[in-house]
Image (cartoon, rainbow, N blue to C red):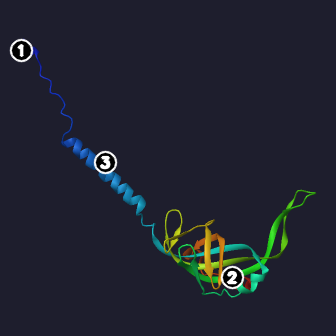
Amino acid sequence: MENDKIKVKKATGFNAIDLLIILFIAALTGAALYYFTNSSRNDADCEVVYTVYVQQIKNELRDSLRLIKPGDEVIDTVHNIPIGRIVDVEIKDYFATVTDKDSGVMRKEPYPGYSEVTLTIKADAKETRESYEINKYKIAVGVQVHFKAGKITSMGYCRSLIPSNIAGPVQTTADLTAES
């Protein structure tokens, strides 16, 4: 009868194998976090060229806009930090989108007394996953930009953003006009 009794050893909960498995999972998690947050393509230094579009500026300010020249520093007025230098300034008459009441067709028509400005800006930046950072200022297409350039302080939207290694040499409006 004594042989019929088999001693069953109870599991004691935690042992060295469990510790090794936990350490292995923690190491894998740490490596994955490091890879995805510090990838070599993140925080890469590059130069970007971006445009800021400002619409509906009263024509009384048009002469002041002409004072903005290539080489002028652009300052973010919210954080008071430099966000690049002007490469080109394009001032045009402002056109508003209107709908014809009879036909329902939308078209652009001149909006008297107003101008629009497109500033082309070049800056050193760091590439991140979702945008570029210029002195810790996140810039991406569609971002609202509060800026000061020359003697003008205004607000516009980033319309385009291209790393200059992709864009090649920056063409100004004068360059494009000369080519045609």
**Element type at marker 1?**
helix
Q: Amino acid at mark 3?
A: Ile
- The outermost residue toward the right is 102
**N-terminal-most mark, 3 or 2:** 3
Residue 136 in percent (x, y) is at 49, 71
The answer to whether one can see residue 166 in this image is: yes
Few, some or many C-alpha atoms within 10 Å of disc 1 (few <14, some 14-19, many ≥20)? few
**Element type at marker 3?**
helix
Q: Which quadrant holds the N terminus?
A: top left
Residue 172 in the image: above or below residue 127: below
Q: Amino acid at mark 2?
A: Val
Query: In front of the other: label 2 or label 1?
Result: 2
Few, some or many C-alpha atoms within 10 Å of disc 2 (few <14, some 14-19, many ≥20)? many
- Occupied quadrant, residue 65: bottom right
74 to the left or right of 66:
left
Q: Amino acid at mark 1?
A: Glu
Q: Which quadrant holds the C terminus?
A: bottom right
Q: CA distance from mark 3 to mark 2?
A: 55 Å
Residue at 35%, 52% in the rendered image: 29
| Mark 1 lies on residue | 2
Residue 41 in the image: above or below residue 82: above
82 to the left or right of 112:
left
Residue at 66%, 76% in the rendered image: 154
Few, some or many C-alpha atoms within 10 Å of disc 3 (few <14, some 14-19, many ≥20)? few
**Element type at marker 2?**
strand
- Dot label at residue 89: 2
Residue at 88%, 56% in the rendered image: 104
| Mark 3 lies on residue | 25
